[in-house]
Image (spheres, helix red, strand yellow):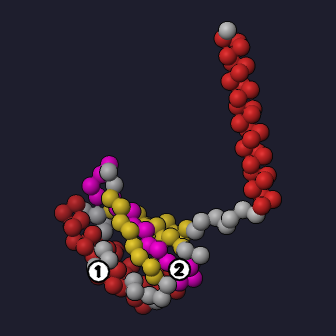
Amino acid sequence: MICFVVTLVKILPDTAPHVIKALRRNGLLAQLKQAPGYISTSILESDLTNDLYLVIDFWESKYDFFESEMSPIGIVLDDVLRRLAYHHSTLGPFTFPPPETLAEAAVSEAMIDAASAESLAEVDSAELVRN
């Protein structure tokens, strides 16, 4: 199952071009991540501040990510990131929840229908009171 590893990185604005270059596909950090199971990295820049980036690494599994983190290359990578950014925090691996079974889907659908019906009844009641 694909694993997404989310890291929040704060970078001094004057070093941002160098850090982004290091994080990109052919950059130093991406080359260091060429571990088994590594797929790719996406970098998102905050629209609200010029020093905040969200780095999302894609791995084939949580196991591959954890193996990489404990490897000598993973330790070097963490050290390089620590030197480039004035703050970085890995929020951890994330995966999509497992798909629902048919029975769970039916229960979810029934709960949504009941909640919708209840909400519509409340709206109808409020309309009657206003009239």
Q: Is residue 98 above or below residue 68?
A: above
The amino acid type, in three-letter code, at marker 2 is Glu
Circle 1 residue? 26
User: What crowding class fits label 1: few (fewer than 14 Cα within 10 Å), some (14-19), or many (20 or more)?
Assistant: few
Q: Nearer the viewer, residue 108 or 95?
A: 108
Q: Could you say whether the residue bearing mark 1 is in a helix, strand or loop?
A: loop
Give the CA separation, mark 2 to mark 1. 20 Å
Magenta segment includes 60 = yes
Lateral position of residue 47 relative to residue 18, left or right: right
Residue 128 pos. (x, y %): 71, 14
Which residue is at the front of the view, 98 or 48? 98
In the displayed structure image, the side of residue 77 where residue 116 appears, left or right: right
Where residue 86 appears, as percent x and y from the top left, is: 31, 66
**Three-letter amino acid code of the residue under disc 1:** Asn
* The N terminus sits in image quarter: bottom right
Residue found 76% across the figure and 63% down from its top: 101
Query: Residue at the spot x=67%, y=9% of the render?
Result: 131
Residue 94, relative to residue 109: is it above or below? below
Q: Which residue is mark 2?
A: 60
How dense is the environment of label 2, judged by Cα within 10 Å: few (below 14), some, or many (20 and up)?
A: some
Q: Which residues are magenta?
A: 48-64
Q: Residue furthest top?
A: 131
Residue 106 magenta-highlighted = no
Secondary structure beneath dot 2 equals: loop
Q: How far from the left and from the top, in percent, is residue 103?
A: 81, 59
Q: Residue at x 43, y 68 (%)?
A: 56
User: Can see residue 31?
Assistant: yes
